Amino acid sequence: MTSEVFTRPGPGSLVWQRMADDRGLLIGGATLVLQVAEPVVGAGVEQHSNFKAEPWRRLYGTLLSLTTIVYGATAEACAEVERLRVMHRTIRGVDDAGRRYAALQPAPWAWVHGTLAWSVIRLNEVFRTPFTEAETEQYWREWLEVGRLLGVRDGDLPPTYAQFCALIDAAAGRRLEDNRSVRDVVRSVSLIPAPAPLRFLGPVWRLLVGRPVGALSRLVTVGALPPAVADRLGLALTDREQRRLRRFIALVAGLRRLMPPPLRPGPVALLIKWRSRRRWDTPSTPVLEGAR
């Protein structure tokens, strides 16, 4: 088995600079909905994931995987890619409509990867720090480089972000669906469950955190979705909810502007980047041909 060398976006790249952002948790629900509305992804999550039972563990695992691939040392990134692909080889089966699926089918595998770029670009658009058109397309090109490391082949995703947005709208009209995984995600973000160590708080958590934070989380989740996707899934905000969402966005944007520019990504994002700069070894990452 031969190998080919790809280049990961390094510390000078837009992906490296902008992916780690503590605000990313705010749009995580919309990203998950967009992902699981794809039938193969939705079936795989429903039948093979522990998302409903352990949403916090699932979220932590996803974030750790992403940051390892983008910000980790080369050996760590390669090991994480191999772990992901080995794990997803077992995710296959038959969905409720009788359709056979496999997680590593090129289209759904690429779809999930594309939505992760959408998430970062849309986050900045929603919370009033939008990318320029040139930055948007640069971010997309760099994200395609990350995709090659993961086995997303040339042609599996459009070459431009504008074309990917058109693909989302087209998919909303014919492929995306309102399935159990979509509803599970919407329920989870609408009433934030307590992490395992805090479950003993029960009603206190629900009253002080679960319901109020969940209400805001649902607003951002539905409001951030592409309109065609929200319509397809029957998700909508009332006029009152839209006004509340605008106030929340203004609050987050205002608080961010009060912070010194170097601190605006947030403490966790800054820690990730600081650690990465100290340990970054080489941008060249070998990928086995069989992983593509």
Image (tube, grey):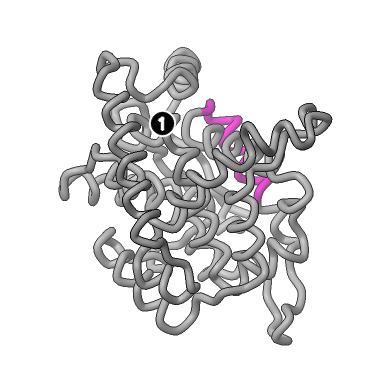
Q: Residue at x 45, y 76 (%)?
A: 232
In the rendered view, does 176 fall on the left or right side of 59? left
Give the answer, above or below, for where 282 lies relative to 26.
above
- 259 is within the stretch colored magenta: no
| Quarter residue 242 falls in | bottom left
Residue 61 visible at all: yes
- 78 is within the stretch colored magenta: yes
| Mark count | 1
In the rendered view, does 42 fall on the left or right side of 128? right
Q: Position of residue 114 (x, y in %)?
A: 42, 57
Q: Nearer the viewer, residue 147 or 15?
A: 15
Mark 1 lies on residue: 21
Q: Nearer the viewer, residue 204 or 227?
A: 204
Q: Residue furthest right?
A: 200
Q: Residue at x 53, y 56 (%)?
A: 151
Magenta range: 72-84
Q: Main secondary structure of the magenta part?
A: helix
Q: Nearer the viewer, residue 279 or 7?
A: 279
Q: Residue at x 33, y 29 (%)?
A: 17
In the rendered view, does 173 fall on the left or right side of 213? left
Q: Position of residue 131 (x, y in %)?
A: 22, 43
Give the answer, above or below, for where 273 lies relative to 122.
above
